[in-house]
Amino acid sequence: MNTRLHPLYRCAVAMLGATALVGSLAVHADDQVPLGITVVRGDSYGASANEAGNYEHEPTNANDQLEDVSALCGKKTGDTAASLVGTDKSCTWGHYMTTLSTTVINLKGHIARTPLPKNPNHCSIRGLTVKQIKGVWSQ
């Protein structure tokens, strides 16, 4: 039996574990991602960021809002998705999709910077339903 995980699944597992750790930490106001920042989400669990399956293992609250969706966030306006993916040394990235923080924030979602070892641009999205978050991503 082959016990090796596909690189995308290793990435998803690493991000899920990291999210569990980060989810318990308090977020300060200066950790909030401002408007106009590039946000990147990779395929997870065999699904693209605009598919419900991408979020099937993400925690939700009593209102069915996602609690801690792992992503990458730029530090400044104009940071590209490719440059952000290149900074994440915690896993191997395959297909990914992007949005702007403005889109998430306008839907009443929240994005906090939650840097991790080998992943300095990690951020966490919360406050959106799966239906909402599926609609924010583009190629």
Image (tube, rainbow, N blue to C red):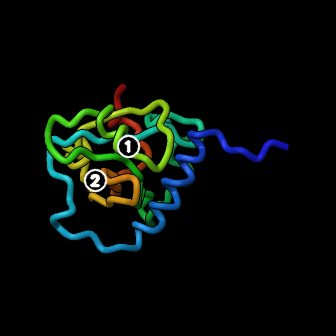
Drawn side of residue 25 relative to residue 106, left or right: right
Q: Which of 108 and 33 is in front in this view?
A: 33
For image coordinates 33% across by 59% down, the residue present is 115
How many numbered tags mark residues here? Answer: 2
For image coordinates 32% across by 54% down, the residue present is 120
- Circle 1 sits in a helix, a strand or a loop, which is it? helix
As drawn, which residue projects farthest toward the top? 139
The image position of residue 19, as x and y in percent, is 45, 61
Q: Nearer the viewer, residue 79 or 106?
A: 79
Would you name the residue on which mark 2 appears? 109
Q: Are marks 2 and 1 in contact (CB under 8 Å)?
A: yes
Drawn side of residue 58 relative to residue 27, left or right: right
Q: How far apart are marks 2 and 1 (CA)?
A: 9 Å
Would you name the residue on which mark 1 appears? 133
Residue 65, can we see it? Answer: no
Quadrant of the rendered structure where residue 41 is?
top left
Image quadrant where one finds the C terminus: top left
